């Protein structure tokens, strides 16, 4: 398996310090999904998940769109997700059937949800179908105020894919998820921010700068702590409170032992210095304290 530098057909994958960037890269087709893209996204995510130097993964699109779902254009293979000319199509079909991705490739949603890195969908434009499902599998979602969203599976006679019926209720609640899936319609970024699907919405004119600032801020939090917070959240999904508390407490106290102690003390001292710098000079500031 290879990462950056591979000759990807439908995506781009690169790294910059502790941040990885996976970009849908079919701007001539508004980043419409093909069989090849489903496979390449899965392969790229497997590579990212195995990189301990990466703390954050950004999922976004090249060009004006994020990912509007399957490319349904008539000059392509007739089925949703068919391969464009020059793109390989992993998976085999019986004569007369449409090409379909390898079923394992749909676990790209699981990778986005469960990989050690914090995953951020940076939604720069149209987001629908598989693109919406990939975004829903990420830890965080931010969007330009000009982005438009749609859940059109039912309108196409389809039930959905990439774990959307699992992820969406956990983000917006069961009632809202049913409303969105049973009554498909176009949605604005403002509407999805109100539902809690989006963490933030920024003006389109400043979206690149604002999203870059947010990603840099997240990456600057420290990889070890980021990974532990994510693992805590994943464990909380599967465990009752008692067993979860045992794991959380062990991780928390490990930050005050051995090699981790010096790093934790340095971060606490830096935070205390920031607090002192923000206080009026006449007001005494408390020194760094060690959490219980």
Image: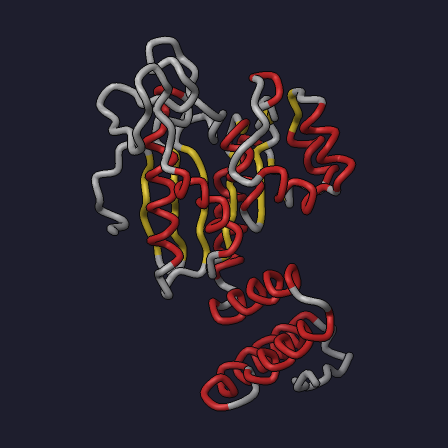
Residue 189 spot, x, y in % from top left = 64, 31
Q: Residue 34, position in %: x, y?
A: 37, 26
View extreme (bottom): residue: 258
Residue 8, position as x, y percentages in the image: 26, 38
Give residue 275's quadrant in the image.
bottom right
Q: In the current view of this chain or complex, which residue is farthest to the front?
A: 94
Image quadrant in which the C terminus is located? bottom right
Residue drawn at (66%, 66%), measured in percent from left and top?
A: 239
* Residue 133 against residue 146 in the figure, above or below: below
* Quadrant of residue 36 within the rendered picture: top left
The residue under the point 53% across, 34% down is: 161
Q: Quadrant of residue 25?
A: top left
Instruction: Answer left or right for 20 relative to 210.
Output: left
Q: Is residue 271 left or right of residue 209?
A: right
Residue 201, relative to residue 286: is it above or below?
above
For this rendering, which residue is in front, 254 or 124? Answer: 254
Q: Pinpoint residue 156: horizontal percent, then vertical percent.
A: 56, 17
Q: Is residue 41 left or right of residue 238?
A: left
In the rendered image of this protein, does residue 72 appear above or below residue 193?
above
């Amino acid at each position: 398996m290879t990462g950056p530098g591979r000759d990807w057909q439908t995506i781009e994958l690169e790294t910059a310090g502790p941040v990885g960037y996976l970009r849908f890269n079919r701007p001539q087709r508004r980043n419409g999904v093909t069989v090849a893209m489903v496979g390449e996204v899965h392969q790229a995510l497997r590579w990212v998940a195995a990189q301990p130097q990466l703390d954050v993964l950004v999922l976004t699109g090249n060009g004006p769109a994020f990912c509007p779902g399957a490319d349904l254009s008539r000059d392509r293979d007739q089925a949703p997700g068919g391969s464009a000319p020059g793109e390989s199509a992993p998976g085999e079909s019986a004569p007369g059937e449409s090409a379909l991705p390898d079923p394992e490739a749909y676990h790209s949603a699981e990778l986005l949800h469960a990989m050690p890195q914090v995953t951020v969908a940076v939604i720069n434009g149209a987001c629908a179908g598989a693109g919406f499902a990939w975004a829903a599998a990420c830890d965080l979602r931010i969007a330009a105020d000009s982005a438009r969203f749609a859940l059109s599976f039912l309108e196409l006679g389809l039930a959905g894919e990439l774990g959307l019926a699992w992820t969406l209720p956990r983000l917006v609640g069961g009632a809202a998820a049913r409303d969105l899936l049973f009554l498909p319609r176009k949605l604005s970024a403002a509407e999805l921010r109100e539902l809690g699907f989006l963490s933030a919405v920024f003006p389109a004119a400043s979206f690149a700068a604002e999203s870059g600032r947010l990603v840099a801020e997240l990456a600057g939090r420290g990889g070890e702590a980021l990974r532990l917070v994510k693992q805590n959240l994943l464990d909380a999904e599967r465990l009752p409170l008692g067993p979860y508390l045992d794991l959380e407490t062990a991780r928390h106290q490990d930050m005050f032992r051995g090699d981790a102690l010096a790093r934790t003390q340095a971060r606490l001292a830096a935070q205390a210095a920031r607090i002192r710098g923000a206080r009026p000079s006449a007001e005494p500031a408390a020194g760094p304290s060690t959490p219980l």
